[in-house]
Amino acid sequence: MQKRHLAAAALLATTVSFAVPSFAQDSSSASDETVVATVAGEPITQSELQSTVEKFQGQFGQMPEEQVRAIALSSLIDMKVIAEAAEKDGIDETEAFKTRMEELRQEELYNAFFDQKINSEITPEMLKERYDEEIANAPKQEEVHARHILVDSEEEAQDIIKQLDDGADFAELAEQHSTGPSASNGGDLGYFSKGQMVPEFEEAAFALEPGAYTETPVKTQFGYHVIEVEDMREKAPVPFEQIEPQLRQLIASEKYNEVVSKLKTDDKIVIEDKDLQEAYDNVNKMQ
């Protein structure tokens, strides 16, 4: 119901291009209970209008705030006059309407319970503790800092290796001969970990000690490589701020399963269909 009247408001917005007069105080200074309009004697308060405005956030681009407020007010008025007409027609007394209202009630109770019993109990300390735990248990990853020279033929790669054996500078040779995009940067590929390069290249790079280069050309689908490793180190963990949302979701999921498992007692839930019971049990085992 809410989505439909918001959609109608969006349609209205495409036709509104006039300057909208100020019809209420700014939300930062007006009381939440300030009446901004009435419909059949029933008030529309500042808080109700502001709630509707927030539902429009991002939908109307750079439209002036007062214009968005006018659209929101029009939407509220439309909803209230239609709701009044629906009640007069007895729509609220139909079984379909009552069923839908009960569904909405249960959805809102579910959401409120989730917010109050799960989300609100996840503290910054819990998130940081879980982060430290995950990082401590995560397998350590090495990464190398390498350069490479990519050429089309094995003979050319072998000639480059001979020049390196004679003391030539790797970066200078990369700039002169490499056909790869890193040539202008002396063949520098920066740091990378396993799984980021094609297998043949990766195997050769991680087999080298810092300061060493490949003694034979490394063939890949791109051509022939001469690889030099400058440094090898342990890969730094992902920063806390970057994965905080995933950590919050993980903890919420665990808390949710814990709470729900206590609520779903055997004597409370009866599934008549045996096949459906089996599928239900399998799904819950996965969770």
Image (tube, grey):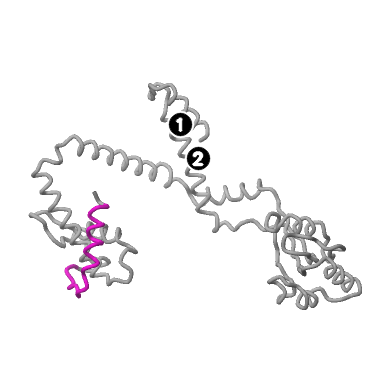
Label 1 sits on residue? 261
**76, above or below 139, in the image:** below
Q: Amino acid at mark 2?
A: Glu
Q: Amino acid at mark 1?
A: Ser
Q: Is residue 91 above or below residue 265?
A: below
* Residue 23 on the magenta span: yes
Q: Is residue 175 shown in magenta? A: no
Q: Is residue 103 above or below residue 129?
A: above
What is the total number of numbered labels drawn onto the structure image? 2
* Residue stretch rendered in magenta on the structure: 3-24
In the rendered view, does 128 fall on the left or right side of 67? Answer: right
Horizontally, residue 10 falls left or right of residue 241, namely left
Quarter of the image for residue 70 reads: bottom left
Packing grade of label 1 (10 A; few <14, some 14-19, many >=20) is few
Question: Which residue occupies 14% across, 51% down?
Answer: 82
| SS under mark 2 | helix
Task: Determine crowd level at label 2: few under 14, some 14-19, many 20+ residues with C-alpha closer than 10 A.
Answer: few
Numbered badge on residue 254: 2
Q: Nearer the viewer, residue 253 or 33?
A: 253
Cα separation between marks 1 and 2 = 11 Å
